[in-house]
Image (cartoon, rainbow, N blue to C red):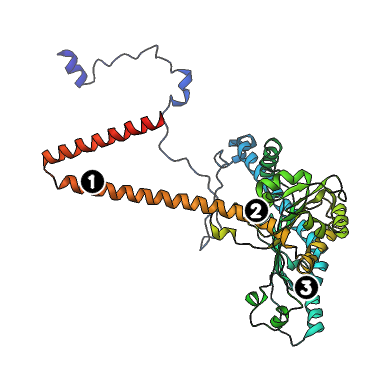
Amino acid sequence: MANVIGSLFGGNKPAENPDPVKADSDFAEFAEGADPRPADAPFTPNTNTFGARPAQTLLPASKWYEVHKRHSIDEFKAEGMILSVIAVMLIFHLFGARLNRTKAKKWIRAHTEPLASEFALVGFGRVSPTEKKGDELIQALAEHNLAEGDNLLRENSLFEFATYATGRANVAFLDVKLTLLKRFNPLTTLFESVFGFFIESFPAPQDICEATIYPFDGKESQVVPGMPGAAELSSKDTKSSYDGFVWAIVHKDKMKQVRDDRFDVSLTVTKDHAKLPAWLTVMTESAEITDLLLTPELIKAAETAGDNFEYLIVSDQPLEQPKTLNDTTPSKRIFLRYHLPSDNEYTNLVPIFKYFLRLPDQLAKSAHFRPEVLKKVKAARDATINKIKKAEDEEKAEERAAERERARKAKRDQELNALDAKGQKKYLEKEREKQMKKGVKKTTARA
């Protein structure tokens, strides 16, 4: 009680602790509480007190804004590698596409002269109307083709280029296709090259020129009706029809591949010829055909072309195995295929190309053989037609048998449905007995 009264009137003050507990040195900064009062800012006199903007105080630099202190180049190695790969691929793409375009342009520049001299229209462009006629018109068209230059070639893709020509006696039109290496995609080229090296059926990629001539074969009036000069084309002097056959001169390294890939060449017989070099061979249906087509000019042009030459084929049969009678309809064409040289030098290849362009004239003039030769040629085609007819007859017979079987089953089901349970049982027993008797007869006949 005394303590309470003393505390109320200020008596008995608590004794001070002579030995207070010292604050932990690790928390020295928290030993004193933060002063809630703002720090006194230093006074700066402002002479212009009316309408002046107050002076701004600069904040000290912070690590949040100093990116170079928070990050380093090492953190972006993955992104750098990805960007480097993309840059390399882009460089290869642009450089490879440019190389392919340059190679295609070199080809058309080397072949523009023979194309312009043999055809009235080369390329996919249009010719402006003109009133010139006769030799003046021919000369004007040739000058137009030469002036077109690189435009005579059309780029279908980064590795495929094509051109077209028409306007020539005995020829409806010419198609040329250049298939080049995919230089813009080195990984694809490497993959195809490796497969071609290990797998025989997968040819290694190469720069290839494939040209195909489609002769008129006496159908000028159907192809160019109503045009000036059509009557002359169909006249007796310019008749372009010739006998159908398959004949080829082939590089021996490509002989097996050509025979496997093309049905028309499979009709021929391979024979070496004394006038040809050892690396060339002839595939023909008759020796008389070879005597006509294997001219000294062709032999010289093929020898000059060298290993770049693959084949020259005259054919009237389809490339693929015919499956219907409509597929066996003759379609006459002339094929030329050769590799493009790596140095873009076409001096040795232009002669075989020129001979190829003029071959329809020789066929229209001389390819008319004796009945004995044509009988032998026709026999191979008749054999193919008979095989197709036999296959079609067998297929029709199977369809008729299946139809009869369906009709028999439908009749049986109808008869069963018309009977009651007892009658159905008897019907099935009779049916089973018939099947057993047939089985016994077959067994007896085999024995």
Foreground residue, 104 or 447?
447
Which residue sits at x=73%, y=48%? 269
Residue 447, image x and y in percent? Answer: 40, 28
Q: Position of residue 352 (x, y in %)?
A: 82, 59
Mark 2 sits on what residue?
380
Q: Are marks 2 and 3 in contact (CB under 8 Å)?
A: no
Query: Residue 401: percent from the left, percent from the top?
Result: 37, 48
Q: Which quadrant would residue 101 be assigned to in this image?
A: bottom right
Asked if residue 87 shows in the view, the reply is: no
Q: In the current view of this chain or complex, which residue is farthest to the top? A: 19
Of the pair 267 and 140, the residue shown nearer to us? 267
The disc placed on residue 145 is 3
Position of residue 110 relative to residue 282, above or below, is below
What's the distance in space between the residues labelled 1 and 2, CA to CA? Answer: 48 Å
Residue at 79 percent across and 79 percent down: it is 138
Q: Earlier in the sequence, mark 2 or mark 3?
A: 3
Q: Amino acid at mark 2?
A: Ala
Q: Is residue 167 above or below residue 133?
A: above
**Of labels 2 and 3, the one closer to you:** 2
Question: Element under label 3?
Answer: helix
Number of disc labels: 3
The residue drawn where x is 67% and y is 75% is 220
